[in-house]
Amino acid sequence: MAGINPPLERSAGRRIGTVAITAPRLVMSWEDWLTFCAAIVTFLSVAVSIQQAHWVNNMPALAPTALMGLLVGMIAARIRFPAVGIHPFAIAIGAVVVMLAVQSYADGATLADRLGDVRLRMQEWWNVVRSGDISNDNLPFVTLVHSACFLAAYTASWAIYRWHNAWVAVVPGGIILLVNISFLKGQPSGAFVIFLFGAIVLVARLHLQKSQLEWHRRNVEYPEFISVSAIQLTLFLTTALLIAAWWLPLGNQADAVQGAFDAVSAPVRGHSDTLVRLFHNIDSRKGARLHTFGDTLPVQGQVKLGTKPVLEVTRTDTRPGLLRGTSYDDYTGNGWKATTRDTTRIDARDLAIDETTGDYQARQVSVLKVKALDSESTILTPGSPLAATINSIIDTPKGFAGDIERMRSRTGLENGDTYNSFGSESLATAEQLSTAGTDYPDWVKQKYLQLPRSLPQRVRDEASQVVKNDKATNPYAQASAVEAYLRTFPYDLLVDSPPAGRDLVDFFLFDLKRGYFDYQATSMVVMLRTLGIPARITVGYALDPGTADQTTYTVKKDNAYSWVEVFFPKYGWVNFNPTQDRPEGGASGFGSSGDGNIEPFPDISDLFPADSTDPLPGPLVDALNEPAVTHSAPPWTLIWSLSGALAAAVALFVGGRLTWNWGLGALEPRAQLWAKTQRLAGWAGLGSRPAETAREWSRRVGSAIDREPEAVGLAEAYEESRYGRPDLQRI
């Protein structure tokens, strides 16, 4: 035949390679196995890095799960069957693999017992998810990590052997590895070096194999052991890149990368309250903020506080104290939740509370000048919140506007933003508080005496015994007795979290007998509530005199703190501190000042207009009139509109491309071109007619567009690809 040459005689090695390529897909050549080995090196490095991070103590090894994911994905990708029928079976196999791995973390003497324990604990965790409760069980996190590991490895192997796309396989694993390394302060970057080596080899291998398939399809001769030569070049380039990568700012040198990571992850961290609620027992890493000021407060174990500055504050007086962030009312047995709140928007400089219902005796207005050094939204106040010089959102008990549980900025706070906040602090004396009585308002009794039904009776008995031993007969004396009792417990950040299903306070009082402020404050609130005394836990920061420059303080992550607010009729909320590392609370204690001989705090709302007849003292007026410095809010409407338009354009492009190429993926390139030409001609009304040959149709279409020679040449190419011998090639 004209234009066709017979192929050159192949050597024995070349014939063996041809047999491997054309063999059934489950039979792999040595080059495919080399690719699989590169994939193993790449993804086991990610699994080992996560394992070495010790997010959860004694977590089952991830390497076998990742290896099984790669193996199942490789076999599934090489089966000649539609993906929709393969994936369900592969996922079922993955579920078995994950369960066999996770069961070793469960409790039970036999495999059946451990599998049953996994089922029950996952069911309990799902109930926690649905109810908005707090989980202290690490088994769901272990299950999630192993599931994600199997799915990531399976997807990567599918991408390698089905799509022949190394980037889809490598990029997600690289992102996971880098994120994991960014949390491992001080850890070596060996896993990253191994991953980089495997990834480069894998990308090079797939590129070469795709070229080999194309050469084979076109009957192009190539060296028998081209992979050996290529691997030498790949190793050389990999070594050069690894030398450069060794200087990347990882581990202790990760300042630049850490800054970029913090900026990118800021939106996620801003909405991480749910993850903290469900997985709060995992290792927090690198001193992440202990309190997020969200709707839940999980009490964590093995706490690592950081030294990163988060605020710079200036008080109007010269004493340290407490910076209030938010409070919680609902004790779950594992931590705290904030419930049944009303939300109100408050303009800058407006009084945020109902002054008629929030007017208590023996309180003083204090001012806090704050400069944010990190992203945040909660407005910190000195005592119970009153007002701020920025537009705010306040959360108050449902149906009562005289008490603020949390105040936050409408637009959030960024590094460099400043504001002034106003709060009221108790100056009541021990005598005044002792005679305050028990005539609690309904909103206080309904919200701040709650206890779970599962609270062990011995916690109630312990509270009663403490006040009995101290001969405390009124709420103030009883609160002081419980505070003093809990201050005898040693301070320890590295205590364990309670086991799954165990009450936090019961575990602290009778097993741990040591802990840090979240444990002590939680225990005091619960014990007081068993005595009928309304109390709530409050979180924020504690100012230390050692960080002060006159009255200016640098607040760091390790200044995080929690304490107890106890309600007293006529006097409002009074601070108590049951943790021994800082001074006690109560009358004139930590967060209080004075002797109680003052008038009720002035009305801030009278400051405006300027001719107010009852102005506040000069420094408070100056602080209220001082302008805040806030960042410009991004044009979210424009951003979301453009993002939506871009997403629509991408979806339209991808959808059009998929539609255009639908059903043509298995065709030879010349046959694909012929099919696409027929589609276009059909849209133009030049579709093929019955009994019309390919050449007849091509001549008719070519004549219509004045391109008959080209159309006939396309028909000849199609006929050759469709009916010609596969071992012949056109010259």
Image: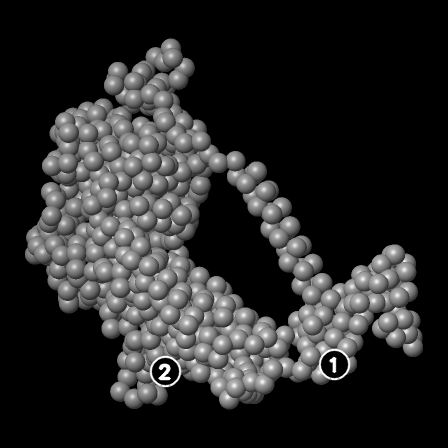
Q: Residue at x 24, y 40 (%)?
A: 309
Q: Residue at x 34, y 12 (%)?
A: 613
How far apart marks 1 and 2 lie (CA) works out to: 53 Å
> Which quadrant does the N terminus fall into?
bottom right
Q: Residue at x 91, y 74 (%)?
A: 692
Q: Amino acid at mark 1?
A: Gly
Residue 380, visible in the rendered structure: no
Residue position for label 2: 100
Res 87 → quadrant? bottom right
Tell which tag, 1 or 2, sits nearer the viewer. Answer: 1
Q: Nearer the viewer, residue 21 or 277?
A: 21
Q: Is residue 349 above or below residue 531?
A: above
Q: Nearer the viewer, residue 709 or 628?
A: 709
The label number, if any, that marks residue 570 in the structure image: none
The label number, if any, that marks residue 724 in the structure image: 1
Q: How is the image coloured?
A: one colour
Residue 415, visible in the rendered structure: yes
Across and down, in percent, residue 411 comes to: 43, 36
Across and down, in percent, residue 51 comes to: 29, 69
Q: In terms of secondary structure, where does tag 1 sit?
A: loop
User: Dot 2: within a 10 Å radius of its alpha carbon, few (fewer than 14), some, or many (20 or more) residues?
Assistant: some
Q: Is residue 51 above or below residue 29?
A: above
Q: Is residue 692 above or below residue 443?
A: below
